Amino acid sequence: MQLPKKGARRLFGADTTARFVPMNQSVLPLGMTRLTAAHVTHEACEKIGGIGSVLEGLITSPIYQRHVKRSILVGPNVHHLEKAPPERLGCDGRVQYSTVDQIDELGLHGKFRPIESAFNVGIVYGQRDFSLPGSEDHTGSAEVLLIDVFNINTQHVNQFKRRLWDVFGIDSTRYESDWAYEEYVRLAEPAFYALLALLKDDELPCLMFSHEFMGLPAAFKATLDGQRQFRTVFHAHECATARRLVEDHAGHDTSFYNILNQASKSPTKLYVDDVFGDQSRLFRHALISKAHVCDAIIAVGEFTAREMHFLGRQFDHHHIDLVHNGIPHLDADLEQVMASRRMLLDYSGRLLGWRPDVLMTHVMRPVISKGVWRDMLVCHELDWRFAQMNRRGALYILTSAGGTRRPQDITSMKAEYGWPRQHREGYPDLVGPEAGFNQMVEQFNATHRNVQGVLVNQFGWSQELCGEDLPVEMTFGDLRRATDVEFGMATYEPFGISPLEPLGSGAVCVISNVCGCRGFVDEVTGGVEIDNVIVGDFTRLDRPWSIEELTRMTQADRDVVERGIASEVAEKLMGRLGEKSRRGLLESGQKLVKGLGWDQVVEAKLIPMLQRVMGDAHRNERAVMRAAKA
């Protein structure tokens, strides 16, 4: 595909600055019906990670349902050959239209077939049910629209890529060998037309959410050809450019966020390319750096909003709305907590040969940014403190890079070498980053007696999935209720739902200061420090560093900072652990999570933003009509 040289026409002139409107003035314009939302995401038919949790929280919220009439989840059909027809939309899905399966329960053939023929794609459409774990009154459903773009008509795709270059300056020739880019560029146009085929006139304009970079090509299509039919929202669950810089640099968050602070305060404001060099080789950066053309941008945390502004001066005059994620409410009373705790203690006794006094957990995705070595540093500080008091502790790290291991594999590994206390490299045991996590745990265990770590590299928590040592009645919810401490001292964490999940059961949640959830907790508590949450500030330096020094920060420099903070965290934990403390933490934790739920987020933050965007849209349309009449 040939592209013209740089300097081609680009659409950067339109003022899409979002104006702040106080919440008590954010009302639906007179006569506006309930909203329609299309969510473009890779988690349209199954929950894989954070975006799936967000969709689950939104769609099951009664507040969201009151304002949003239709939710349509849009994504590529990645399992078109792997799954049987009833399972194409996941275990909670119902297929109502499928080209390959010749299903058409709703008479959609006339609407979808022209699109399928023009683009040479296959469409699967239906419904998917949602329920929020731990909240029986929070259920919902959404439509799902999946499009198989593998054999798409490349002439259409190349024409669209040409427009992406001409208008937005995105050079697809640099990225099209990466399927993660190519797939969502291919999805954009057929998804746009399929949505128009599904929507009625009185359901327009539709709010199109781009969840991360995946939905941006579709949002760009809507910007180019659907300004009256769509309003676009970029939902920044992270800033991909910032994540890569934090994870790849030896100084991690310690260097990056100090750089970010100084760059924003510099007399001549600095941006990411000024400090770290040209980032355009990365397709995610190329896409999200154009997110300012959307009608609105929402970020899950304050740092994510600042990271988006750091991408370039095109974001300087664009308001970014802060819409936190919600924390699922885990119902628990002291009796339930103690029952769950006994089950984990019984398991520990069989696995370790002794029953811990303190139970610690870290439930996480298997990525370096979760900062597992910081758990080890805090446990190192706890080890000698526990020894002085004749106490012992166990840390369970629950993560999986290999999906769900089969029950028979778990049984075999347990019998052969004592999994999960012992591990071996290679599937069905350690794969990918799991080997590095296990090495940290083994090195720690070899030199410490009063605290021991256990890596459970399994997706799920039940006797069937984790072995016969686990009590038969124990569930993942019991694991969350049982823990005394949940670690989440990430180097990069745009929000962090998981680190706060055990709050309602009275656990102490230990997070880093760069976690987006820290800002949400501060909002609810008014900034007052509470015993339920400990914040480790790994960006605190003992002297001012220049940007040049920060870019050269070594691991040894960071180690000094981390050891000091780990000691502070351990000291705070020592004052908050014990049965008496647990009673008070349970009461305050239950009170805290009531203000951190999805209903609160939707009502106070998301809906006012959407109403403002739709209100602006209607005001702009009325202005155009008045001008035409004049």
Image: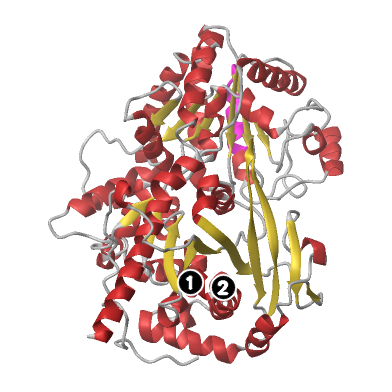
Task: Tell me if residue 421 comes above or below residue 544 in the rendering.
Answer: above
Task: Tell me if residue 88 comes above or below residue 12 in the rendering.
Answer: above
Q: Quadrant of residue 82?
A: bottom right
Q: Which residue is under mark 2?
A: 199
Q: Name the residue located 60 percent from the left edge and 24 percent from the top edge.
A: 483
Q: Can residue 249 be seen in this snapshot?
A: no
> Which quarter of the figure is the C terminus placed in?
bottom left
Q: Position of residue 379 (x, y in %)?
A: 52, 24
Left or right of 273? Residue 301 is right
Depth check: 474 or 180 in front?
474
Left or right of 62? Residue 96 is right
**Labels 1 and 2: the sequence-earlier one:** 2
Q: Quadrant of residue 6?
A: bottom left
Q: Which residue is under mark 1?
A: 204
Highlighted range, magenta? 438-450
Q: Amino acid at mark 1?
A: Leu
Q: Residues within 10 Å of mark 2 (few under 14, many from 20)?
A: some
Q: Can residue 398 be seen in this snapshot?
A: yes
Depth check: 485 or 143 in front?
143
In the rendered structure, find residue 108 and report the number of the disc placed on it: none
Q: Name the residue located 26 percent from the left edge and 61 percent from the top edge.
A: 271
Q: Name the residue located 32 percent from the left edge and 83 percent from the top edge.
A: 10
